[in-house]
């Protein structure tokens, strides 16, 4: 089995944490993984993406070819659309609903939602609101991850174990927050 | 040994640590920064007293690494591609002096210019200096090539260039460790002429370097990082893939065997014998390389009559600029391309921007008001976050060329009669390459205003220390700027009027003025606060 996922968002929104959690889950299975990140100038409030490739077999390219991603997993709705050229015909779009408006010409959000819901295989949830509701406002990224794990093919137990590994040494509260966020994401879709 | 999940940069750093390095030297620069940051965080490095502190710039870093090699220990200097321009003088001459302890010069290129001013290909520098070049294609090779590079360096007493590119530097994958080697002990060179480049000695050194060339080719012929798969049946095409390009080639064939003969290059100079063999046995050649067409040009040579077609970046088979990807390689091979749906029109560009609450925003706003009477085109910028001051709504700077150029370009423009002539430079960039330019201005009492944006860190690359932290005012005084015209303020909205006034006064002053807005980068401030909260 192999999963190619484009993680999308704006610099600082936590897509690399999603990548780390999924990466740890893949490692526990003994899978191969490649994950290309964006560092440097683009991180300053610009659009950022990460190519995450998980596979039972060795992986060659660090980049996912255009038109071959199984999923776009995005923490920002407009950013989900930016990477459509990477998505395969039967790929999923799973995205947060809350826009991150740091540009003056941010488009009409309804036009963005219309594009997203035009895809049969989409999940559009308000990760920010859900994270606030469960009193874990900084775990929006893991809420969105929760909405995606069955489509990626990981169990809740596997992801919980990966969350523990990822946040090791950062205290129990942050692990608990992310467990709740994961559960809320699973429930929300 | 254990398997670690590492960025290409980190794999190289871990490899160097396990291969018995004694010192890393570097100035931060995307995409190379994480090499030394990893070493700085490493317990192993601390326990083994490996040098990991930042240098003032790539030139001082390169020279320190050469010095550590002189003393018999293994050293690595790391930088982004344009950093090699800064350190080109010691780099070129290090090929003449050679190494004593193993010396690896690691340069991370940035094709497609994700975070850079150009996309120069450092392999040309390696060829220029006539030294071996290593080009890893994956994270495991990054790790392994640290061992290989030091071994090669110590075998021939020669520095080795190790070339990374952004996609490998910043991509993570599993890396298997080996048993660590001990560091070298302190050991001066046996030959005290070795590092003495007086002309009479240098001439001998050059002959020696020329003499080594055939040996380097032989090393490439036998290198485990050059793979010669010449048995495939379809000889209508032969393929040469270097570094990362090899991955894309393997990717596009998936689980199918590649029907054409293939040479994978991970070590230079090129293994001439096999390349010639490939050329002779195939009807045409496709060259896949990340960067500029170095291999392609060598193969084409002077196109003689009856030469076979060579496809690559020069004939348009592959885009002349920008980084490779699997799709470009698939198209070059005439395969069916894949592409998802186009990006919808509703998606707006989201370029990088100064962070909310960034001190530079306040500094720029006041500067732009003070400059209002003179129109645009008077402010020379530099390399750092504040380069984004070019973008709306700031529209504050008009030039960005290389580290330190703000001051010296503003000086040249002032010499030509431009008034006002303003330089805007960051604290760490001033540290890197600004001080000599300021000395030039003081020497002639140039009519110039130099704004040193002091955000207490090297911001663009993620917040690294720099060597003259907290000493900017003293340095300017020491270089001879009149104390009355070294002005500081805290760039905050509440100080706005005072800031505009200071800018205006110093523009009016005929001579060298330095204005230093001081307020910590909000990213490093956030990090500190987070750390405090976690305590």
Image (spheres, rainbow, N blue to C red):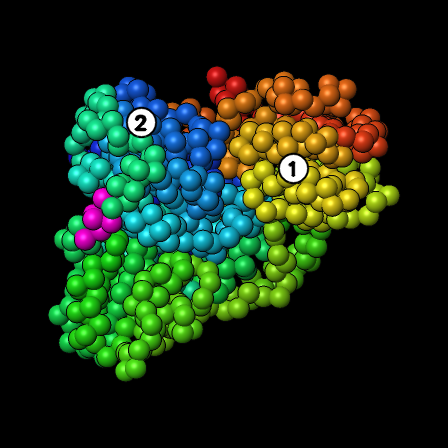
Q: What residue would you read off at disc 2?
A: B68
Quadrant that contains the N terminus of chain A? bottom left
> In the image shown, does B259 or A153 lie closer to the viewer?
B259
Residue that lies at the very extreme toward the right in this rendered image: B373
* Mark 2 residue element: helix
Q: Neighbour class for label 1 at 10 Å: few (<14), some, many (≥20)?
A: many
Does residue B470 appear left or right of residue B15 in this picture? right
| Residue appearing at x 28%, y 82% in the figure | B306
Res B442 → quadrant: top right
For residue B407, the mark is: 1
Q: Read off the chain for label 2.
A: B
Residue B346 can be seen, yes or no: yes
- Helix or strand or loop: what does disc 1 sit on? helix
Chain for numbered disc 1 = B
Residue shown at 31%/38% (left/top)? B200
Task: List x then y, in percent, for residue B449.
Answer: 74, 33
Relative height, residue A62 to residue A17 (above, below): below
Q: Earlier in the sequence, mark 2 or mark 1?
A: 2
On the image, the x and y values in percent for residue A153 come to 33, 52
The residues bearing labels 2 and 1 have C-alpha atoms spaced at a distance of 33 Å
Q: Quadrant of residue B366?
A: top right
For the residue pair B477 and B18, the one nearer the viewer reads as: B477
Q: Which numbered disc covers residue B39? A: none
Give the residue displayed 70% in from the left and 32% down from the top: B444
Choose between B365 and B308: the one closer to the eye: B308
Q: Is residue A151 magenta?
A: no
Query: What residue span does the magenta drawing correspond to?
Result: B208-214
Q: Residue B39: in sight, yes or no?
A: no
Question: Which residue is at 44% across, 28% downward?
Answer: B54
Q: Main secondary structure of the magenta part?
A: helix
Do callouts 2 and 1 point to residues on the same chain?
A: yes
Circles 2, 1 touching at the beta carbon (< 8 Å) = no
């Amino acid at each position: 089995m192999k999963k190619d996922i484009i993680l999308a968002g704006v610099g600082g929104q936590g897509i690399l944490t999603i990548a780390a959690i999924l990466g740890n889950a893949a490692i526990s299975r003994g899978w191969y993984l490649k994950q290309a990140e964006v560092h440097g100038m683009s991180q300053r409030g610009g659009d950022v993406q990460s190519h995450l490739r998980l596979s039972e077999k060795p992986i060659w390219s660090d980049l996912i070819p255009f038109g071959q991603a199984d999923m776009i997993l995005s923490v920002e709705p407009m950013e989900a659309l930016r990477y459509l050229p990477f998505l395969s015909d039967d790929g999923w779009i799973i995205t947060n609903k809350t826009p991150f408006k740091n540009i003056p010409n941010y488009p009409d959000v309804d036009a963005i939602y219309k594009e997203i819901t035009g895809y049969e295989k989409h999940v559009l949830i308000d990760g920010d609101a859900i994270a606030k509701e469960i009193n874990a406002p900084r775990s929006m990224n893991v809420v969105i991850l929760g909405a995606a794990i069955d489509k990626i093919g990981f169990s809740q137990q596997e992801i919980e174990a990966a969350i523990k590994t990822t946040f090791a040494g950062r205290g129990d509260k942050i692990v608990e927050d992310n467990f709740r966020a994961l559960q809320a994401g699973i429930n929300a879709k | 040994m254990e398997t670690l999940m590492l960025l290409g940069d980190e794999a190289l750093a871990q490899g160097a640590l396990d291969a018995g390095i004694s010192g890393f030297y570097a100035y931060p620069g995307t995409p190379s920064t994480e090499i030394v940051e990893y070493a700085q965080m490493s317990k192993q490095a601390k326990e083994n007293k490996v040098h990991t502190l930042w240098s003032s710039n790539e030139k001082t870093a390169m020279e320190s690494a050469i010095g550590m090699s002189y003393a018999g220990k293994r050293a690595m200097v790391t930088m982004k591609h344009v950093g090699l321009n800064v350190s080109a003088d010691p780099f070129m001459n290090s090929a003449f002096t050679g190494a004593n302890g193993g010396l690896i010069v690691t340069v991370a290129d940035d094709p497609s210019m994700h975070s850079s001013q150009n996309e120069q290909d450092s392999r040309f520098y390696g060829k220029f200096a006539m030294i071996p070049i290593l080009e890893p294609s994956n994270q495991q090779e990054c790790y392994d090539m640290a061992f290989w590079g030091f071994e090669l360096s110590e075998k021939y007493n020669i520095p080795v260039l190790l070339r990374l590119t952004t996609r490998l530097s910043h991509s993570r994958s599993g890396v298997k460790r080996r048993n660590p080697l001990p560091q070298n002990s302190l050991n001066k060179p046996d030959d005290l002429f070795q590092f003495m480049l007086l002309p009479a000695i240098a001439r001998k050194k050059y002959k020696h370097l020329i003499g080594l060339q055939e040996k380097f080719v032989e090393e490439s012929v036998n290198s485990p990082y050059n793979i010669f798969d010449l048995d495939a049946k379809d000889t209508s095409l032969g393929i040469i893939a270097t570094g990362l390009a090899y991955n894309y080639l393997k990717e596009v064939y998936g689980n199918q065997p590649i029907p054409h003969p293939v040479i994978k290059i991970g070590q230079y100079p090129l293994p001439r014998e096999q390349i010639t063999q490939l050329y002779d046995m195939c009807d045409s050649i496709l060259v896949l390389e990340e960067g500029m067409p170095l291999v392609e040009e060598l193969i084409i040579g002077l196109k003689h009559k009856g030469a076979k077609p060579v496809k690559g970046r020069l004939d348009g088979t592959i885009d002349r600029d920008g980084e490779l990807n699997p799709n470009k390689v698939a198209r070059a091979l005439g395969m069916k391309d894949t592409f998802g749906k186009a990006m919808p029109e509703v998606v707006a560009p989201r370029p990088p921007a100064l962070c909310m609450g960034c001190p530079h925003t306040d500094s720029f706003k006041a500067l732009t008001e003070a400059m209002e009477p003179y129109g645009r085109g008077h402010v020379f910028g530099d390399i750092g976050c504040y380069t984004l001051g070019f973008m709306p709504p700031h529209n504050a700077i008009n030039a960005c060329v290389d580290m330190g150029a703000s001051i010296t370009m503003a000086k040249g423009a002032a010499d030509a009669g431009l008034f006002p002539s303003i330089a805007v430079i960051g604290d760490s960039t001033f540290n890197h390459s600004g001080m000599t330019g300021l000395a030039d201005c003081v020497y002639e009492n140039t009519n110039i205003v130099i704004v040193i944006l002091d955000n207490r860190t090297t911001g663009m690359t993620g917040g690294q220390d720099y060597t003259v932290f907290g000493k900017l005012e003293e340095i300017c005084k020491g270089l001879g700027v009149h104390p009355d015209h070294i002005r500081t303020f805290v760039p905050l909205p509440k100080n706005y009027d005072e800031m505009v006034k200071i800018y205006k006064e110093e523009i009016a002053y005929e001579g060298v003025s330095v204005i230093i807005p001081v307020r910590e980068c909000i990213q490093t401030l956030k990090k500190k606060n987070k750390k405090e909260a976690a305590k």
